[in-house]
Image (tube, rainbow, N blue to C red):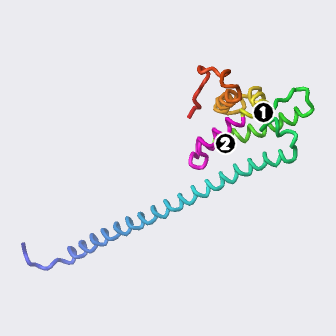
Amino acid sequence: MSNEPLSLYQLLSLLILLAGFAAVGGVLLLWYRLARQTARQTAQIADSLKVSLYGAGAVQMLTVDSLFLDHPRLRPYFYGGEDLREDDSLYPQAQAMAELILDYFNSIMRQMRHFPDVWPRVWWESYLIDSFKNSPVLCRYLRSVGDWYSPDLDVLMKQGERKRQPPEAAAPSDVQKTPA
């Protein structure tokens, strides 16, 4: 190896090579910082979406609750297990309430599928099954317009109807698991 000094061309080539390495390192550092910042922002957006979804669900539930406050005569048909004849004067209001409740339930089913950590299936399925158990009116309305809603609601309705029956009336072969 010779001890000759580097020519101007070699020195400039070396400096350009080092500058290129430094530039690549700088770009990689910037890319890393940007990726971290994007990940933080994405997590914040996801948290914001969860809060919004929960808030929207709470508003829907409170809307149903407030309608029962405005129309307390309907409450026994949705929470007390009482049935209602089609010729009863309350029947049209009960049908409208059933449609609103089923719209809410259908919304819950969609949210459970897409956001299970906000809408835990075990809590909501229990609530929905008990709602069907306590409301023959709700079940009858769902059967009349079943194609409007998720098939999962039909499965939960059948489970609620079985819970409404005395234990000896429910046949073990009728038991179905709710689809995931």
Please tell me which of labels 2 and 1 falls first in the chain.
1
Q: Is residue 7 magenta?
A: no
Q: Main secondary structure of the magenta part?
A: helix
Secondary structure found at label 2: helix
Secondary structure found at label 1: loop
Q: Residues within 10 Å of mark 2 (few under 14, many from 20)?
A: many
Q: Amino acid at mark 1?
A: Gly
Q: Which mark is residue 81?
A: 1
The residue wearing badge 2 is: 108
Residue 56: x %, y % from top left: 70, 51
Q: Quadrant of the C terminus?
A: top right
Q: In the shown orientation, is residue 76 left or right of residue 44?
A: right
User: Where is 93 relative to 70, above or below?
Assistant: above
Q: Which mark is residue 19?
A: none
Q: Is residue 127 magenta?
A: yes
Residue in the image at 77% along x and 29% along y: 136
Which quarter of the picture shows residue 159?
top right
Residue 120: x %, y % from top left: 59, 45
Q: Quadrant of the N terminus?
A: bottom left
Q: Mark 2 to mark 1: distance in Å?
A: 22 Å
Magenta highlight range: 111-131
Question: Is label 2 or label 1 in front?
Answer: 1
Q: Amino acid at mark 2?
A: Ile
Q: In the shown orientation, is residue 84 left or right of residue 114?
A: right
Residue in the image at 69% along x and 36% along y: 130
Which quarter of the picture shows residue 96?
top right
Which quarter of the picture shows residue 74?
top right
User: Where is 9 relative to 120, above or below?
Assistant: below
